[in-house]
Amino acid sequence: EAPATGKASTRFDLEKETELRFEVESGEAAEQVELELLTGMAEVFGSELNRNKKYTFGPGSKIAVFTWQGCSVNLFGKPEVAYVSKDTPMLLYLNTHAALEQMRKQAERDNERGPRVMVVGPTDVGKSTVCRLLLSYAVRVGRRPTLVELDVGQSGVSVPGTVSALCIERPADVEEGFSVQAPLVYHFGSTTPGTNIKLYNKLTSRLAEVFSQRCEVNRKASVGGCIINTCGWVKGSGYQALVHCASAFEVDVVLVLDHERLYNELKRDLPHFVRVVLLPKSGGVVERSKECRRDTRDEKIREYFYGFRGVSFYPFSFEVRFSDVRIYKIGAPSIPDSCLPLGMSQDDTQLKMVPVTPGRDLTYHVLSVSSAEDGEEGARKDIVESPVCGFIVVTYVDTQTQVMKVLSPAPRPLPRHTLLIMDIRFMDMK
Ligand code: ATP
C-alpha cells in the first residue's frame, strides 16, 4: 500500500471524539512509525494535523491522535501497540481551556492579568501533556501564554536539572513539541527537588518575579497568563513546594490530575479564591520505568549538543584551564543545627556557593555556565539567581596539567567563567 517507504500500513477510521493511541518501540534499533491523516480533522496533543503529510515518530514515542469530528489515518511501520479508545477526558480538557479563555477575555476587558495555572499530580498522569494541550489551544486562539517548567526531572524546555520559562508563540510541533527559542533557564543541579528544596523554592520565586516583571511591560503576556508544569513529588516537602509555588505565582487555578487527596489538601491549604479543580487522567498515559525516565533525560542532553532529527548541531571539544574558571556546587551538605556557626541558618548552607576543586570525579558531569558577570566574591550571591547561558560536559580531567576537556555547543572561549556543577552526568557514546 505504501511503496514509497515500503512499510506496512494500517488504516484506522475514527469516530468523533475518539483517539488512536500508539507507541513506538524503544531502543536504538527500533523502527520509526509514520502517521498520515487521510480524511477529516485530527490533532496530536492540541496541534492540528495537516492532511497528506507524513509525521514521523521515533523510538519510545507515545502518541494520541484525537479527533473532534471523525477522521481516518494511516500508520506506517510496526507500532508496539495501536488501538482506538472512545474513553478520553478530552472534552473536560477542552472545557478547562474554554474556562481559561473566558478568564483571559475578562482580563482583557477589565485591564487585569490573565489566568495563572498550576498543573499538579503524581508521576505519569499526563501533566506535561495537559500543559502542552492548554498552551497549544491558547495560542491557536491568538494568546501568548507562558510555559513555566518546574519539573527538574523531565523538563520539556531545557536539559534536566533546570527550571525555566518559555513564551509560547505557536502551537507545539506535532513531532518535536514547542519550539524552544530563548527560554529563560536557571540552574538547579539535580533531577529531584528534594536534593535542595530551599534552592528549588528560591528559583520558583525568582521565575515568578521575572514573569511578573514581564507581564508589567507586555500586555499580551499578562493576558495570556501562564501554565506551570510541576514535579510528580506531591508529599512532604514536595507538597510544600507546590504550596510555595502557588503563592509565589499567585496562581488563580490549580488543576489536579487524578489525585483526590492532593486535591483536598490543596483546597484546604490554598486561599479560598484559588480555584482548585480535579481532573481525570487519560487512560492513554503510559507509565514510565526508571530506566525509561533516565533514557529520556539522556536524550534531552544529547539533543542539546547534537540537535534533533532534521537539525544537526556539531558541538566543540576543547581544553579549559582550571585557573580560567570557577566551579561551584550550590548547597553545602546539611549539618546539625547545633553545629552551625553562630548566626548561620540551615537556609544559608543550602544556598551556599561551595567552590569545587576539579578532580577526576568531575568527569562526565554536566556544568551550567552562569550568565553572572565574572565578578569578585561579592557577586557570588547573585549567581544562584542568575540565568544560565548554556551547558558543557566535562569529558576528561588532567589533574597533572590542571586542565579539563569539555564538550560545548559553541567554540572556545567560554562566554563566562562561572560554572555550576550538576549531579547529572552525561556519557557521550557517539
Ligand atoms: P512526569 O511524571 O514525568 O511529570 P507526566 O505526568 O507529565 O509525567 P506526560 O509526560 O504528560 O506525563 O505523559 C507521559 C507519556 O504518556 C508521554 O510519553 C505522553 O506522550 C504519553 N501520553 C499522554 N497522553 C496520552 C494519550 N492520551 N495516549 C497515549 N499516550 C499519551
Image (cartoon, rainbow, N blue to C red):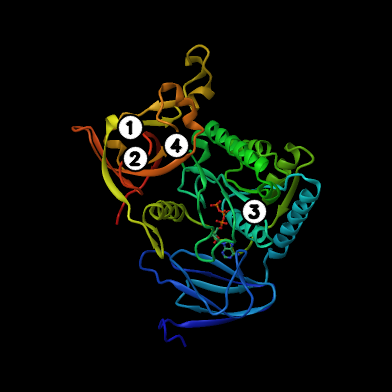
What's under tag 2, amino acid-wise? Leu
- First in sequence: mark 1 or mark 2? 1
Residue located 49% across and 31% down the image: 384
Left or right: 360 as drawn, with respect to 181? left
| Mark 2: few/some/many CA within 10 Å (<14, 14-19, 20+) | some
Q: Position of residue 183 (x, y in %)?
A: 52, 48
What's under tag 4, amino acid-wise? Ser
Distance between the Cα atoms at labels 2 and 3?
Answer: 33 Å
Identify the residue position indicated by label 3 in the image.
Answer: 144
Q: Secondary structure at mark 4?
A: loop
Q: Position of residue 61 (x, y in %)?
A: 49, 64
| Mark 1: few/some/many CA within 10 Å (<14, 14-19, 20+) | some
Q: Is residue 380 above or below residue 108?
A: above
Identify the residue position indicated by label 2 in the image.
Answer: 414
Distance between the Cα atoms at labels 4 and 1?
Answer: 13 Å
Residues marked 3 and 4 touching at CB (< 8 Å): no
Q: Secondary structure at mark 2?
A: loop
Identify the residue position indicated by label 4 in the image.
Answer: 371
- First in sequence: mark 4 or mark 1? 1
The C terminus: image quadrant: bottom left
Distance between the Cα atoms at labels 1 and 2?
Answer: 9 Å
Q: Is residue 236 above or below residue 230?
A: above
Tag shown at residue 148: none
* Of the two numbered discs 3 and 1 in the rendering, the one whose residue sits closer to the viewer: 3
What's under tag 3, amino acid-wise? Arg
- First in sequence: mark 3 or mark 1? 3
What's under tag 1, amino acid-wise? Val
Residue located 52% across and 65% down the image: 62
